[in-house]
């Protein structure tokens, strides 16, 4: 078999548009898209996937966790296989593209090969992972972790935020076998894998602002997080306490925020990449008042970077700043419980190969990190060579305004189609 | 009549302690002190005042707004009179001293003179003003404004926060005549006044920190306020939007807070006095999330100073900063409705006289501004020579922990007693 240049007209645009439309249809009368993990929304989407895979004459597999796989047999079925996949659940009132684009990309790659009567040198497995979003169950990547036999059994007892029922119960409802999952039973993890490829809409504006169709991801950021941080100062009358006697918790927070931003700025000037975000803040409503110096403020902090060294530097600086401000202002920071995740680097070989192919096929692109987490991180952390592609998207993600142009999606599919022909 | 040095042992300590105890008694089983304006709490306190004034054989007057006055006739009743007064309402779950200390100080001054068989050269009027706190009705100084015939009639239609009933109804319940108040009818404003004196607990920690019993107030701060300010940025994924593309409303707020604090610091270095407070802040709970860049943040701003020039400078700087940050960060500040009050300067003559007397009578003291508003401001703004004295207090005010030592209160009473003997 010879790798051929994938022409635009080889792509089945009608299939792509039909799949996105049919995925969105159940939510036509509602605001945004809601495909609940291990619930009716996700189930309907998986059914559409199975139906499409059947129409493409693929081998359909299903594992104990309810993940679905559609296999396009390659010329040599013993060779390590490619996995192209993502998830079909969405956040409540989200958009139609987050997750789904990666699954439809996988099907499109196979449809494109089929149309041209091309058989790939190795199996191509299109994978649909369950429950990637952490809004339903309070943890991410449930499906992809189970797919690799890496889901800790206690996770099966977590309850879904809206139903209050356990993951095990929901899994059973969807035809899964939680007891088997608990033992590590899985289908995909038994196969030797050539690499895992995930196409995803970009969730930020970089590609749109830089007028590029595709982003070749260099790594998925790791993070450290303090979800329930607080600063304690001293309540006082806003007019009656002179400057030297104030212990204003909110002014202390503002100084912390600016100091973190300043540190981040210096890192970026050195060429490092990170994000620093305080997503939520509040003075306590039962105690605060217009004319009171705040004695307390609650906030959260989310710091991400693809570089462990940058994360370590930012966290060390955080503790230094908190210490200094505490002393200088007579306030006390309590950062509360810490959570963290490790960066998941992409395969350098695959990243370089994608760049070569993008140049060769005149696909407008750049390298960029992924600040958000994805199923691909599970594979990278399991040691599978992994590569993500971003497709230009407007209005971010996790909201009804998500917008991806078909032409940009096609550029991503062309790149993947070429890549898996080796 | 000769002005005599007021000795400590001339003061009726038992009367003072009894009055504070009896004022607090109805709240013994509850948290803090709640004397509701134009309600049962304030009524009970006024009844105690009347009873005490009768026992001191004073002439009792009551005006259409329900303010009470107790007159100790002077040697020459035609001379302009002294007013010593404050209020007896409290905030919900407040302390026993805010307001009440000023009324009990007036009664103590007269009790002291009576004990020594001293008649002052002019009438001394102890005044109790209704409804000074703005937590019950949404405006301050209701009683003192009515006492001078300066209450706008439409204010009578304001409703009390907890009962939903109008000020006019509450006033009538308490034996007042709102129709007469609406025409400007009053008792006190008809008298020529030598000066208005208000003793009040300090609501900040300056006296306590500097180990001084009495503060001689230089002026009551004016203010400008934005109670419903907001900053609008752009919502985004906390990990997916690179630094140059962020429009983080909360980081913009933090920069504003720091810039205002910096301006304030420079003013203080020049010897000016002011306070800058953001008492409340919140990202919108329906939209914010741990992993979202905040696209909106709401906050309030309270700036106070005794100097109109300082207020003007701070407000001009506020607008410059908001403009600059808006441009630099691609966010928009909407400061919302503005309210403001003018500074109320104290009488320089009275301030100097108090200083002289404090030195003479070895009363530990300093000059300091009042950041909070008081009934005295109504008199200063009406052109009456006005002087406030602060008494050292622990734990601020408007809370159950308010704490004033009897010995410090006595120092304030000594100063007032000497002052009104001229």
Image (tube, coloured by chain):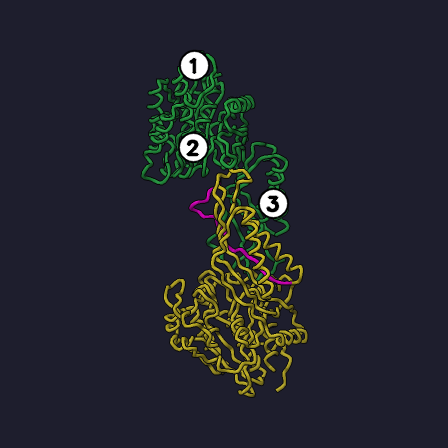
Chain colours: A green, B yellow
Q: Earlier in the sequence, mark 1 or mark 3?
A: 1
- Near mark 2 (Cα within 10 A), the count class, few <14, some 14-19 or many ≥20, is few
- Near mark 3 (Cα within 10 A), the count class, few <14, some 14-19 or many ≥20, is some
Could you say whether the residue bearing mark 3 is in a helix, strand or loop? helix
Instruction: Identify the disc placed on residue A329.
Output: none
Find residue A349 and report its image quarter.
top right
Q: Earlier in the sequence, mark 2 or mark 1?
A: 1
What type of secondary structure mainly makes up the magenta span?
Answer: loop
Residue B311 placement (x, y as % from top left) = 58, 63
Is residue B370 or residue A371 the one in the foreground?
A371
Residue A382 placement (x, y as % from top left) = 51, 24
Instruction: State which region is magenta.
Output: B272-290
**Which residue is denoted by mark 2 in the rendering?**
A405
Q: Do labels 2 and 3 share a chain?
A: yes
**Which residue is denoted by mark 1 in the rendering?**
A74
Q: Spatial distance from mark 2 to mark 3, Cα to Cα? A: 39 Å
């Amino acid at each position: 078999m010879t790798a051929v240049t994938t022409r635009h007209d080889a792509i089945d645009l009608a299939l792509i548009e039909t799949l996105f439309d049919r995925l969105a249809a159940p939510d036509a009368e509602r605001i945004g898209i809601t495909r609940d993990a291990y619930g009716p929304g996700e189930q309907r989407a998986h059914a559409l996937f199975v139906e499409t895979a059947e129409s493409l004459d693929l081998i359909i597999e299903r594992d104990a966790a309810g993940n679905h796989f559609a296999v396009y047999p390659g010329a040599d079925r013993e060779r390590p296989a490619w996995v192209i996949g993502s998830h079909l659940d969405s956040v409540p009132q989200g958009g139609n593209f987050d997750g789904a684009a990666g699954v439809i990309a996988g099907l499109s790659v196979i449809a494109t090969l089929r149309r041209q009567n091309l058989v790939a040198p190795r199996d191509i497995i299109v994978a649909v992972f369950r429950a990637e979003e952490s809004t339903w169950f309070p943890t991410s990547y449930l499906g992809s972790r189970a797919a690799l036999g890496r889901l800790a059994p206690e996770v099966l007892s977590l309850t879904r935020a809206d139903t209050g029922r356990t993951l095990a119960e929901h899994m059973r409802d969807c035809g899964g076998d939680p007891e088997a999952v608990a033992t590590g039973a899985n289908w995909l993890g038994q196969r030797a894998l050539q690499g895992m490829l995930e196409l995803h809409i970009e969730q930020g504006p970089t590609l749109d602002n830089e007028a590029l169709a595709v982003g070749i991801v260099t790594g998925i950021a790791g993070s450290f997080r303090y979800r329930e941080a607080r600063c304690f100062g001293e309540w006082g009358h806003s007019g009656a306490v002179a400057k030297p006697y104030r212990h204003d918790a909110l002014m202390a927070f503002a100084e912390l925020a600016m100091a973190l931003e300043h540190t981040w700025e210096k890192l970026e000037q050195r060429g490092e990449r990170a994000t620093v975000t305080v997503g939520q803040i509040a003075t306590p409503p039962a105690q605060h008042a217009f004319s009171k110096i705040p004695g307390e403020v609650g906030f959260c902090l989310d710091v991400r970077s693809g570089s462990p060294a940058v994360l370590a530097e930012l966290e060390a600086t955080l503790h230094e700043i908190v210490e200094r401000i505490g002393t200088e202002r007579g306030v006390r920071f309590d950062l509360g419980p810490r959570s963290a995740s490790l960066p998941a680097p992409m395969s350098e070989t695959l990243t370089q190969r994608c760049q070569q192919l993008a140049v060769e096929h005149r696909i407008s692109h750049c390298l960029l990190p992924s600040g958000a987490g994805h199923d691909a991180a599970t594979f990278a952390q399991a040691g599978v060579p992994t590569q993500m592609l971003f497709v230009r998207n407007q209005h971010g993600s996790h909201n009804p305004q998500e917008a991806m142009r078909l032409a940009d999606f096609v550029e991503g599919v062309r790149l993947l189609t070429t890549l898996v022909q080796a």
